[in-house]
Image (cartoon, rainbow, N blue to C red):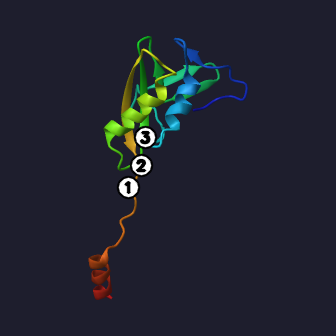
Amino acid sequence: MTTTSASPPAVVHGVDVAAVAAAVAACPAVAGLVTGPRGGPATYLPGQQVDGVRIRPRRVEIAIRARWGVPAAEVAAQVRDALRTLAPDRRVDVVIADLTEPPPAVAGPADREAVEWKH
């Protein structure tokens, strides 16, 4: 999210966009909000741009970078739970636009033997 230092509260269709972005970013399965491909969710307001959030009258669109290894259904559930009180009575569409890198592979005993044999 890009903001200026004196940005007023960003309310669109009765929903605080900054609060939505903060709640989504706080989800354990979310690594960050993204705009995604051309035309992806973003909210443009005077002096600020909120990436990955678009508020519509009947729905909220969210685009995120999810953490590797978390099932998509769990990611979506976390985001929807986080927005339950901020955007009541609105459908929440969650787009997983990107994933974090997987953790580095840990060499097991068979891998160590192969490495030792090569030396």
Give percent across and percent down for residue 36.
41, 33
**Type of amino acid at the residue the image marks with label 1:** Pro
**Label 1 belongs to which residue?**
102
Residue contact at pointers 1 and 2, CB within 8 angstroms: yes
Q: Nearer the viewer, residue 65 or 45?
A: 65
**Label 2 belongs to which residue?**
100
Q: Residue at x 54, y 12 (%)?
A: 14
Q: Nearer the viewer, residue 19 or 97?
A: 19
Q: Residue at x 36, y 46 (%)?
A: 70
Mark nearer the N terminus (1 vs 3): 3
Secondary-structure class at tag 1? loop
**Type of amino acid at the residue the image marks with label 2:** Thr
Rounded to the nearest whole Å, what is the CA distance between mark 3 and mark 2? 7 Å
Secondary-structure class at tag 2? loop
Secondary-structure class at tag 3? strand
Mark 1 crowd level (few <14, some 14–19, many ≥20, 10 Å Cα): few
Residue contact at pointers 3 and 2, CB within 8 angstroms: yes
Q: Is residue 71 left or right of residue 60?
A: left
Q: Residue at x 72, y 29 (%)?
A: 5
Give percent across and percent down for residue 75.
38, 38
Mark 3 crowd level (few <14, some 14–19, many ≥20, 10 Å Cα): many
Rounded to the nearest whole Å, what is the CA distance between mark 1 and mark 2? 6 Å
Mark nearer the N terminus (3 vs 2): 3
Q: Which mark is residue 50?
A: none
